[in-house]
Image (cartoon, rainbow, N blue to C red):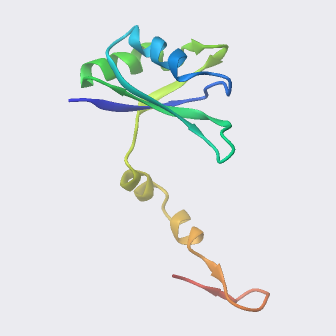
Amino acid sequence: MSKKLYVGNLTYSISEDAVRNAFAEVGEVLSVRLITDESGKMKGFGFVEMASEEDAARAIKTLNGATLMGRNIIVNEARSQSEKTKTTGGASRRMQTKRASGTGRGNRQWK
């Protein structure tokens, strides 16, 4: 079964091919997706899908902390959106805060 990995601290000038080649040295890579903003600028992280859990474990062990294009990269298992929401605690509630009409304290409404 395939396994998706989070890859962080990437240089903004890195290409999908460079990431694919680094991970292909430790196992079979199914896909690479580098995250960009609206203007197309790299955000410094992405996701690599490895063909098996064994390949993913080997990639984490071998590449986490390794240097890729002058940066020590972070490699770990990608978390699903629902897992990230669970770990944010009160942050999700704060993000749902919206201002009512008017200004000043006490004009907040919780969704």
Q: Where does the image place residue 70, in percent across and percent down from the top left?
A: 67, 13
Instruction: Give whichever of 25, 78 is nearer the camera.
Output: 25
Whole-percent x, y for residue 45 in the image: 56, 33
| Residue drawn at point x = 65 percent, y = 39 percent | 40
- Residue 29, picture quadrant: top left
- Taking the view exactly as shown, the residue that stands out farthest to the right is 103
Q: Residue at x 72, y 91 (%)?
A: 101
> Where 3 sits versus 107, above or below?
above
- As drawn, is 34 to the left or to the right of 27? right
Find residue 49 and report its horizontal and vertical position in percent: 36, 29
19 vs 104, nearest the viewer:
19
Using the rendered view, name the quadrant where residue 79 is placed.
top left
Q: Quadrant of the N terminus?
A: top left
The image quadrant that residue 108 belongs to is: bottom right
Seen at 44% across and 52% down, the residue is 84
Residue pictured at 37% horizontal, 55% vertical: 82
- Residue placed farthest to the left in the image? 1
Choose between 76 and 11: the one closer to the eye: 11
How many marks do you count on the picture?
A: 0
Q: Answer left or right for 86 relative to 97.
A: left
Direction front: furthest residue? 39
Tell me residue 67's x, y (percent).
59, 13
In the rendered image, the residue lying farthest to the top is 25
